[in-house]
Image: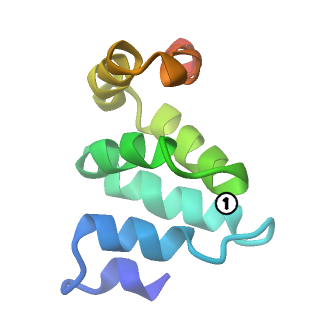
Amino acid sequence: MQAVLNPNLNMAEKVEYLLQDVDATTKNDVENSIVAMGARVVNILVDKLRTLKGIQRGIVAMSLIRIGQSAVAPLKELAMENNEYQWMADYLLSEI
C-alpha cells in the first residue's frame, strides 16, 4: 500500500500496483485505497473494467460505485461506445 504515498507514481501506476496480487484478505484495503483517490481515478477504473476479471474487476466496480457521481458520465460513455460492456455500465449506474 505504500505505493499510494509515493509521489513518483502516477495515478494509473498506483491503481495498477494496488490491484496486483490482491486476494480476499487485502480486497477491502485495496478498495478503500482506490476510493480514497476519488474522481482522479475514475477514467482509469472505467478503462480497467474492459480488461480485468474476477476479484480485481469486482474491486474496480465497487470502487466506482463508492466514488459515485463522478463515475456516471464515463460509465455512460462506456455503455454507448461498446455494447459488450453496456450491461456492466448499466448495473453500476443503477447502484450509484
Determine which residue is flagged by label 1: 28
| Furthest residue toward right | 24
Q: Residue at x 41, y 17 (%)?
A: 79
Q: Can residue 89 be seen from the camera position used here?
A: no
Picture layout, residue 30 above or below residue 84: below
Q: Position of residue 39 (x, y in %)?
A: 27, 43
Q: Can residue 2 be seen from the camera position used here?
A: yes
The residue carrying pointer 1 sits among few (fewer than 14), some (14 to 19) or many (20 or more) residues within 10 Å by Cα, namely few
Tally of numbered tags:
1
Front residue of this view, candidates 95 and 88: 88
Q: Position of residue 45 (x, y in %)?
A: 40, 47
Q: How is the image coloured?
A: rainbow
Front residue of this view, candidates 27 and 20: 20
Q: Position of residue 83 (x, y in %)?
A: 47, 15
Picture layout, residue 95 above or below residue 35: above
Helix, strand or loop under label 1: helix
In this image, 19 relative to 37: left or right?
right
Three-letter code, disc 1: Asn
Front residue of this view, candidates 78 and 66: 78
Q: Residue at x 75, y 69 (%)?
A: 23
The quadrant holding residue 36 is bottom left
Q: Residue at x 53, y 47 (%)?
A: 60
In this image, 39 relative to 35: left or right?
left
The quadrant holding residue 4 is bottom left
Picture layout, residue 89 above or below residue 64: above
Q: Position of residue 76 (x, y in %)?
A: 35, 16
Picture layout, residue 34 above or below residue 78: below
